[in-house]
Image (tube, rainbow, N blue to C red):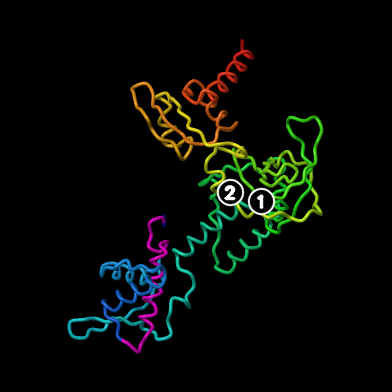
Amino acid sequence: MFLGKSMATNKHATIRYHALDQCFANFGRKYFIDDLIEACNNALYEFNGLSDGIKRRQIFDDIKFMESDQGWAILLERYKEGKRIYYRYSDKSFSIKKQAINESESNQLKETLSILSRFKGMPQFEWIDEILIRLESTFNIHQVNNTSSIVGFEQNQYLKGLDFFGELFNAILYKKSLNIHYQSFNRAVPTTMEIHPYYLKQYNSRWFLIGLNPRYQKLSNIALDRILHFTDSNTPYIANETIDFEEYFEDAIGVSVEGREIEKVILQIARQTWPYIETKPIHGSQKVLERTENYVMIELHLKINFELETLILSRGEAITVISPESLRNQIRSRVNALNQKYS
């Protein structure tokens, strides 16, 4: 059963169901259709300060769903008074709040369990196993056996350094400074640096730790697969009070951001490659400047870094840098170096 558009997955629908439940369980008042509409509108207003102006048809659909096996299979009486009808439960003690979860809620929980199960291999997230077992036993539901063949996540569980993830996560959460022993790709011997960890970010299937390096008074990004080990530092933790990391990385591709300014980049995309760039933009700022039979010209506003260069080169001759000249020269230099290797 596909629930993407189901009423049961809609937050407002849930509010309406519980509002109707209160009306049907109230034997001290007669609730006609207009009263049910008003009760639902009032409940929605209390939730978000807005009234969607619920229609009669919506209430009838909600009642039909609540009476179905996919809902709560409620037993609802309809009493005629003149030309109008009011609604009550057959059983005064009944309420959907007292019922076990319905089929739709069960399916939603199964979807949640499937998503949570993807974290089972992450170090120090072993508690998820216990949560999954408790949810399955409490609600008598089980994950779909073939979930892994339905949805695929890009996660490299064999990535070196992944076993540090849980401890680094806790260091950020509990605000602990660290001494990290790090083997850079560019150095023959390891180095040790003090880091005040702030953020964990994944890019291109690798994980990076972003934190303050007090020696240089700037942020450093550290690939987890290059960390040898780390220990707690005795230095008082310097908290991050200024940077929103969602915004911090919004103006760049990847993790190399520190000290860079936003620049305008113009790229010429070969027509045959354009559908891939159009449906999966290089960056959120992407804007079309010109379309011809042979190419599409686009404009980006972002911080130029190594990750952008690599992405451009990954498309080979299908992408041409028009400006700025500095980026054009850098791509030319890397292409020349590559050409020499194959000459």
Q: Amino acid at mark 2?
A: Phe
Q: Amino acid at mark 1?
A: Tyr
Left or right, 214 with reference to 135: right
Task: Specify the label residue 268 is tagged with.
Answer: none
Q: Where in the figure is residue 254, as x and y percent of width and height?
A: 58, 38
Badge 2 is on which residue?
A: 245
Q: Residue furthest top?
A: 343
Q: Residue furthest left?
A: 83
Badge 1 is on which residue?
A: 198
Q: Which secondary structure, mark 1?
A: strand
Left or right, 158 with reference to 283: right
Q: Where in the figure is residue 205, as x and y percent of width and height?
A: 61, 40
Q: What segment is highlighted magenta in the picture?
A: 4-29
Residue at 53% from the left image edge and 58% from the top image edge: 112
Q: Is residue 302 magenta?
A: no
Q: Is residue 23 magenta?
A: yes
Q: Where in the figure is residue 30, as x and y percent of width and height?
A: 30, 85
- Which quadrant of the figure has residue 217? top right
Q: Is residue 326 above or below residue 16?
A: above
Residue at 82% from the left image edge and 33% from the top image edge: 189
Which one is in front, 122 or 101? 122
Point out the image quarter for the C terminus.
Answer: top right
For marks 2 and 1 on the same chain, the one whose residue lies earlier in the sequence: 1
Which one is in front, 236 or 312? 236
User: Does the CB distance between marks 2 and 1 fall below 8 Å?
Assistant: yes
Point out the image quarter for the N terminus.
Answer: bottom left
Which one is in front, 262 or 339? 262
Instruction: Report, in whole angstroms, how far the alpha carbon at label 2 lies from the one at label 1.
Output: 9 Å
Crowding at label 1, few (<14), some or many (≥20) Cα neighbours within 10 Å?
many
Magenta span main SS: helix
